[in-house]
Amino acid sequence: MKDTYRDIVRSRLKKDIVSVEHHYRVDVFIAAIDSQLHELNSRFNESVTELLRLSTSLDPRKPFVIDDICKLVNKYYLLDFTEQEKLQLRSELQHYELDIPYHPKLKNARSLSELCRGLQETRKYENYELVDRLIRLILTLPVSTATSERAFSAMKIVKTRLRSTMSDDFLKSCLILYIEKEITETFSTDQLIHDFDSFSRRRVKLRPHKVPT
């Protein structure tokens, strides 16, 4: 690792003499890390990054910080908790900190989903109703984020240059049909025609009438 690194292709262009260790540490490893950080920073803004950081406050493997949990609720879950519940949450978290980490069936939880399941099995959720609600909201975060990503990806396919004048309602309906392919494939064309025709009477007959035999 202390030997001089020699690049057969670029040896004539590089004037600095570096060791093999320096090459793999700086030119390869650190360069790859910088590229990944640049990609993450361009994909997630500061608000999303803070949300993800605060969401780990209830992870049983992370340090338990009550201020971060309260900040998470006050800043990102305003509509899920009333003002009275926000005040009660801090008191509930103080009892939670002295109880759950030392509970024989909950202290060995390795993930937030295991903790949520353990609260249900031990019925501890009845004592920490607000904390249990917050844990459930955090667990749904990856699902809601993935749905948004799928919607933006589908928009590029559905709203093409030839469909640039479609209304918002029609675009939303097309996106739902495209994103939920697993559900739409279970619908039959005849059933859709039947349901559409049953909404109101129309001059054009969509369904052929059965001729009595």
Image (spheres, helix red, strand yellow):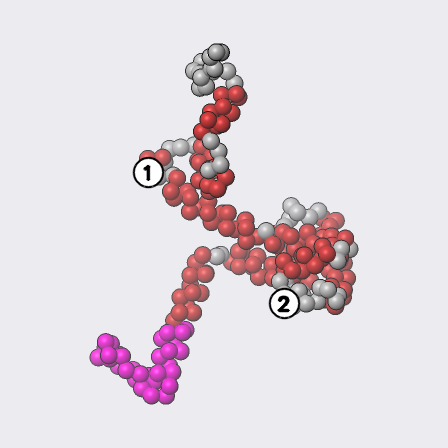
Tell me if residue 11 is in the magenta stretch.
Answer: yes
Q: Which residues are magenta?
A: 1-30
- Residue lying furthest bottom: 2
Residue assigned mark 2? 61
Residue assigned mark 1? 161
Tell me if residue 49 is in the magenta stretch.
Answer: no
Dominant secondary structure (helix, strand or loop) of the stretch shown in magenta: loop
Residue 30: mark in rendering: none
Please name which of the two marks, 2 or 1, marks the residue nearer to the observer.
2
Q: The residue under label 2 is which amino acid type?
A: Arg
SS assignment at label 1: helix
- Residue lying furthest front: 213
Q: In x, y percent, where is residue 194?
A: 49, 23
The quarter of the picture where the N terminus appears is bottom left
Q: For residue 106, say whether it is visible.
A: yes
* Closer to us: 55 or 70: 55
Task: Say which residue appears at 38% left-offset and 83% top-offset.
Answer: 21
Above or below 69: residue 151: above
For the residues labelled 2 and 1, the Cα–Cα distance comes to 49 Å
Q: In x, y percent, where is residue 13?
A: 23, 77
Task: Say which residue appears at 39% left-offset and 39% top-offset.
Answer: 158
Residue 66's quadrant in the figure? bottom right
SS assignment at label 2: loop
Total count of labels = 2
* Closer to us: 96 or 196: 196
Q: The residue under label 1 is which amino acid type?
A: Arg
* Closer to us: 91 or 150: 150
Task: Say which residue appears at 40% left-offset and 78% top-offset.
Answer: 25
Above or below 192: residue 52: below
